[in-house]
Image: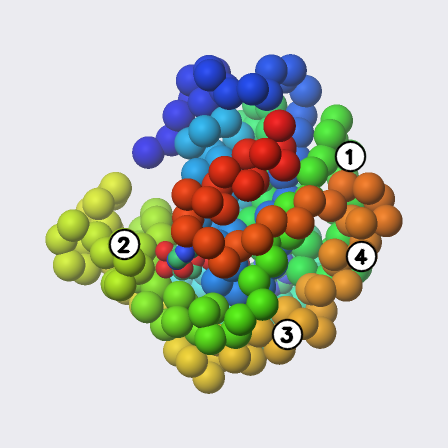
Amino acid sequence: MKLSPKEGKEGSEVEDNKMKRIILFGAPGSGKGTQADALEQQYGWEKISTGDLVRAEVAAQTPIGREIKPLIEMGQLAPDETVLKILKNRLAQGDLVNGYILDGFPRNLAQAEELTRLAVDSETAIFLKIVNDDVVVGRLTSRLTCSQCGAIYNSVGNPPLKTGQCDLCGGPVRQRADDNEETVRRRINVYREQTQPVIDYYKRLGKLHEVDASGTVEEVSAAIAGAIN
Ligand code: AP5
Ligand code: MG
């Protein structure tokens, strides 16, 4: 369930209404989607997940979706220009009132540089740090996702109330095609090779906040709130 931006801002410590961009990046399974949902609820900023956007293209069997489906299922990145085009289309929808949260973009230096060209009033890059691959593999091989609204569950820690059915929209809750152990380990390697350099990029810009993502969901949320405020 989404709050309106006004409702979401109530009670939060972030007061001005200039366009903000929060970037959440980190390894697969570091909790980007979970924390973006929490921020959306808390502040009313819109969550934009490039993973959700590319999966929607795949589900709709668009020409782009057909092109990128094998890449996603292999755990490789989709081409930069394709993801950037999808992201720009999303940003152009005109519903972003005072801020948005990017979940899963940028994934490499080229994407980070392109993003910087899309100016906003303020930008905070939050790196969700998690070092133990086995924790990530455990989280992702037990993750369940609503294929209709994208809600995130976990068969161990946070299952839907009714097996196979989303609590929020009633849609089907399933395992993602790329959440098997072999593909997860490949995604971790892709992250190390391509996404880790983004840490230094935001450090150089003075916008980087590093958050320990190995604690509970609530602990990570509290650390992110501290970084934002
Ligand atoms: P994407 O969907 O972004 O996948 P990802 O980056 O691999 O990240 P995940 O969604 O797997 O993990 P998450 O960090 O969101 O964790 P979550 O909160 O769900 O991208 C998928 C694919 O799309 C890419 O491989 C690529 O092909 C393509 N793509 C997307 N963006 C792209 C781009 N910019 N450029 C090119 N290609 C792109 O949590 C995971 C599980 O852990 C859940 O079950 C959750 O309940 C649980 N959990 C979360 N936090 C905690 C916690 N603190 N403690 C315990 N459990 C937790
Ligand atoms: Mg995600």
Q: Position of residue 134 (x, y in %)?
A: 46, 75
Name the residue tied to disc 4. 200
Q: Is residue 21 above or below residue 56?
A: above
* Three-letter amino acid code at the position of disc 2: Asn
Outermost residue on the left side: it is 162
Name the residue tied to disc 1. 119
For the question of whether residue 117 can be seen, the reply is: no
- Frontmost of labels 2 and 1 is 2
- Frontmost of labels 3 and 1 is 3
Q: Is mark 3 within 8 Å of ligand 1?
A: yes
Q: Name the residue located 71 percent from the left edge and 74 percent from the top edge.
A: 193
Crowd rating for badge 2 (residues with CA inside 10 Å; few <14, some 14–19, many 20+) = few
Q: Name the residue located 67 percent from the left edge and 72 percent from the top edge.
A: 192
* Three-letter amino acid code at the position of disc 4: Asp
Gap in angstroms between the C-alphas marked 2 and 1: 37 Å
Q: Is mark 2 within 8 Å of ligand 1?
A: yes
Name the residue tied to disc 2. 158
Outermost residue on the right side: it is 204
- Frontmost of labels 3 and 4 is 4
Give the structural element (helix, strand or loop) at label 2: loop
Name the residue tied to disc 3. 190
Report the quarter where the N terminus lies: top left
- Tag 2 or tag 4, which sits nearer the N-term? 2
